[in-house]
Image (cartoon, rainbow, N blue to C red):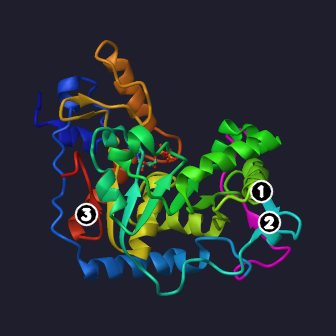
Amino acid sequence: QHTGQTSTDLKHGGQTSTDRGQVDTEFHATPFLGFNLTAIKEFRAAVEKRAKLRQYLFVTKNNTKLGERFKCLETDEWVLDPGSIRITEKNFYKKLPQESPVKANRTFRACSVVGNAGMLRNSSCGGEIDSSNFVFRSNFPPIGGEYNDDVGTKTQFLTANPSIFAKFYKNLKKTADKKSLAEDLTRYGHALVWTHPFHLKRYADVTLRAHDATRKFKTQNPVLFSHPKFLRNLTAFWNEHGMKAVRASTGLALATIAASLCDQVTLYGFWPFPFYRGRALSYHYYDRAVIGDVQFQNKTLEYYLLTNFHPYHNFTEEFLILQKMQGKGILKVQVGECQ
Ligand code: CDP
């Protein structure tokens, strides 16, 4: 099955072939030789210097003035100006915490960042994930029940792209949809929800409604807003460190945050390739459709389009960045089954 050519193909974004033999990876991971405290400290200091994570991860009353204007980060393709949002008492200000829950010098010991890659299915990584002190997940992935063994049950930090509120909770306009969000959030215990009102202006209001929903239905989940300054500087940080894509994905953002807040970070479910050791994979671990043998060439292409030719981020490029970090002992990237 393996051609030995694959890792080079993948370095070029996997565009060269949709042949199963060639894309079925014999990816040579950079070995993980243990955590390197000096490298971790250097990385943390560099992120802190560029993105001021401890100050700007969340919008708080301490880092925002009433009446301040936040410039949004992106536009829809057909609009030139991303626009801005003025922080008023009525919209965001009264919903902001006084200060960031991330305390100045506090770090967590062991953290897991759970990406959503199909490789997690049948990985038996759930126990390992749950044994860490702090678990990051992105975009409301299904957990519990049939997923317990593979992805675990704990969550402390949950990202929510506002498009999820728009798409799956019908913009949170009706009480029934707010209630359904509140009910779904119970899966994640006390996890804080990190969402992005200042990304695309048209999504700002739905993040406010998500906040209202958690209050109205008294969920345990604080909804916290990302500061545009942090997201902008995070991308700048990675661009200055070799990333070509115009923005970091949720996964790379979480890996960066985790490495800044935790002594030992392990990533799970970061695998932007359509195959693993001869096994065809779904794009997300919870997707039903696996790349079928019958039409695998089309499906493989679709997979590459999703992971490599996303308009903003590129998972393969990010995967190689994360491999480099693993090589330096800044974090560990778990590939394949857990022991
Ligand atoms: O929001 P986004 O499209 O970035 O991500 P997602 O599909 O919800 O998955 C969360 C993260 O898992 C991504 O940002 C990637 O870092 C990682 N992922 C991966 O490495 N390979 C996949 N096949 C799917 C996701």
Q: Is mark 1 within 8 Å of ligand 1?
A: no
Q: Residue furthest top?
A: 294
Mark 3 and mark 1: Cα distance apart in space:
37 Å
> Mark 3 Cα within 10 Å, few/some/many (few <14, many 20+)?
many
Circle 3 SS class = helix
Quadrant of residue 164 within the rendered picture: top right
**Can you give x and y, in whole percent of width and height, for residue 225 in the image?**
67, 64
Q: CA–CA distance between discs 1 and 2? A: 7 Å
Residue that label 2 marks = 92
Mark pair 2, 3: CA separation: 39 Å
Q: Which of marks 1 and 2 is nearer the N terminus?
A: 2
Q: Do the residues labelled 1 and 2 touch (CB within 8 Å)?
A: yes
Q: What residue type is labelled 2?
A: Phe
**Prevailing SS of the magenta stretch:** loop
Q: Mark 1 points at which residue?
A: 208
Q: Is residue 299 visible?
A: yes
SS at mark 2 in the image: loop
Nearer to us in this view, 284 or 301: 284
Range drawn in magenta: 62-82
Q: Residue 326 carries which label?
A: 3
* Residue occupying image coordinates x 37% and y 61%: 112
76 magenta-colored: yes
- Residue 46 spot, x, y in % from top left: 42, 78
Horizontal and vertical percent for residue 35?
A: 23, 73
Q: What residue type is labelled 3?
A: Gln
Q: How crowded is mark 2: few (under 14 residues within 10 Å), some or many (20 or more)?
A: many
